[in-house]
């Protein structure tokens, strides 16, 4: 992946998660939506794996840029959008 003329290396899981967010750009996705789409398995709903991988993605694609792509919608989930 490339952002601001810099190549960004993603793991397979980070890539799948980002792809789900891109395909649903502008739509708020719950943690369950993301678990089912990016991992394609039913995790324990108490897990924080989505939050952990969202954090990994943010560190890679939203660091040192003015327009953040990944946004948290409190109590609902995450959304990919450009400001």
Image (cartoon, rainbow, N blue to C red):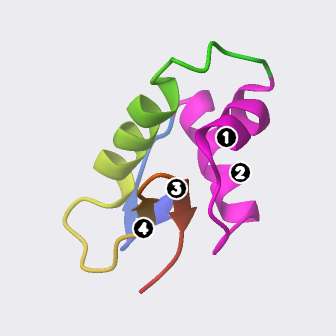
Of marks 2 and 1, the one in the foreground: 1
Q: How far apart, in angstroms, are the residues tagged by discs 4 and 2?
A: 18 Å
| Disc 4 target residue | 3
Q: Under tag 3, what secondary structure? A: strand
Q: Is residue 47 left or right of residue 15?
A: left
Magenta residue span: 11-40
Q: Which dot, 4 or 2, sits closer to the camera? A: 2
Q: Are marks 3 and 1 in contact (CB under 8 Å)?
A: yes
Mark 3: give few (<14), some (14-19) or many (20+) Cα within 10 Å: many
Give residue 66's position: percent from left, percent from top: 24, 79
* Residue at x 62% of width, y 47% of height: 30
Q: Is residue 14 magenta?
A: yes
The nearer-to-camera label among 4 and 1 is: 1
Check contact, mark 2 vs mark 1: CB within 8 A: yes
Percent across and percent down for residue 8 are 42, 50
Q: Which mark is residue 10?
A: none
Nearer to us in this view, 7 or 61:
61
Above or below, comparing residue 46 to residue 62 in the picture: above
Residue bearing mark 3: 78
Mark 2 and mark 1: span between their CA atoms? 7 Å
| Helix, strand or loop under label 4 | strand
In front: label 3 or label 2: 3
Pointer 3 or 1: first along the chain: 1
Q: Earlier in the sequence, mark 4 or mark 3?
A: 4
Labels 4, 3: front one = 3
Label 1, on which residue? 34
Q: Residue furthest bottom?
A: 83
């Amino acid at each position: 992946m490339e952002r601001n003329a810099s190549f960004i290396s993603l793991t397979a899981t980070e890539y799948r998660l980002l792809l789900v967010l891109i395909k649903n750009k502008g739509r708020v996705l719950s943690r369950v939506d993301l678990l089912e789409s990016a991992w394609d398995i039913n995790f324990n709903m108490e897990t924080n794996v989505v939050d952990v991988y969202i954090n990994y993605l943010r560190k890679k694609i939203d660091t040192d840029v003015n327009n953040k792509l990944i946004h948290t919608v409190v109590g609902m989930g995450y959304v990919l959008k450009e400001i």
